Amino acid sequence: MVSETYVECLVAKKPNFGTRLLKTLLIMLTVCFVLIGMLFAPGFLIAIVTGIGAYFAYMNADIEYEYLYLDKEITIDKVMAKSKRKKAATYDINHMDILAPVNSHRLDSYKNRNGKIADYSSGTVEQPDKRYMMVLDGEVRVIFEPNEEMIKAIQTIAPRKVFND
């Protein structure tokens, strides 16, 4: 008998000031160049370019991360503007060294190591901080915001590697 645990969690990333400013600026430029394009034809070409830029800025300004835990594997998808989904990463729990809150003293030995840091959190530090760090193979550090149900599901698989302090 195979026991599969399925937990899903969705976290919205807070857009930074630069992305919001760029999106607004490109939309305003597009409108201006459309109006200019009514008088001078080259204005339409510039409006098309700024419109494409505004589209990509819009897609990258509204990002959500979906965490999916299924059968000892965490899959993280990046959902852009609630319409386009892109697989960001997949992590195997068997390669996990530790899972603890970001500010936990248990992560002190991993803080100064060189390696890849992947941040799939909302980007905001709340009180209390809901972000967790997962270290895989001593190298890859993943920051994300799992819900309590996901933490408990991971803890049933690796009870000595998951901490809530």
Image (spheres, helix red, strand yellow):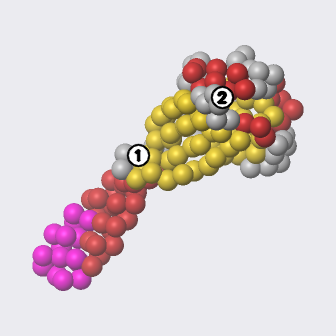
Please, what is the three-letter code of the amino acid marked with disc 2? Met
* Front residue of 13 and 100: 100
Locate residue 24 relative to residue 111 in the image: left or right: left
Quadrant in which the C terminus appears: top right
Q: Is residue 48 above or below residue 155?
A: below
Task: Identify the residue under disc 2.
Answer: 1
Name the spot of residue 105 as percent of width and height, x first. Answer: 80, 23
Q: Is residue 17 visible?
A: no
Disc 1 marks a residue whose amino acid type is: Asp
**Disc 1 secondary structure class:** loop
Q: Dot 2: what SS?
A: loop
Mark 2 surroundings: few (<14), some (14-19) or many (≥20) residues within 10 A: few
Quadrant of the image occupied by residue 4: top right
Is 103 magenta? The answer is no
Q: Residue 70, how many percent across, how many down?
A: 60, 35
Which residue does the numbered mark 1 point to in the structure image?
62
Judge depth for marks 2 and 1 and give the one in front. 2
Span shown in magenta: 30-44
**Does residue 37 belong to the magenta stretch?**
yes
Instruction: Say which residue appears at 78% left-offset and 30% top-offset.
Output: 98
- Please say if 92 is above or below 162: below
Give 29 or 7, whichever is nearer the viewer: 7
Give how far apart the Cα atoms at labels 2 and 1 are: 41 Å
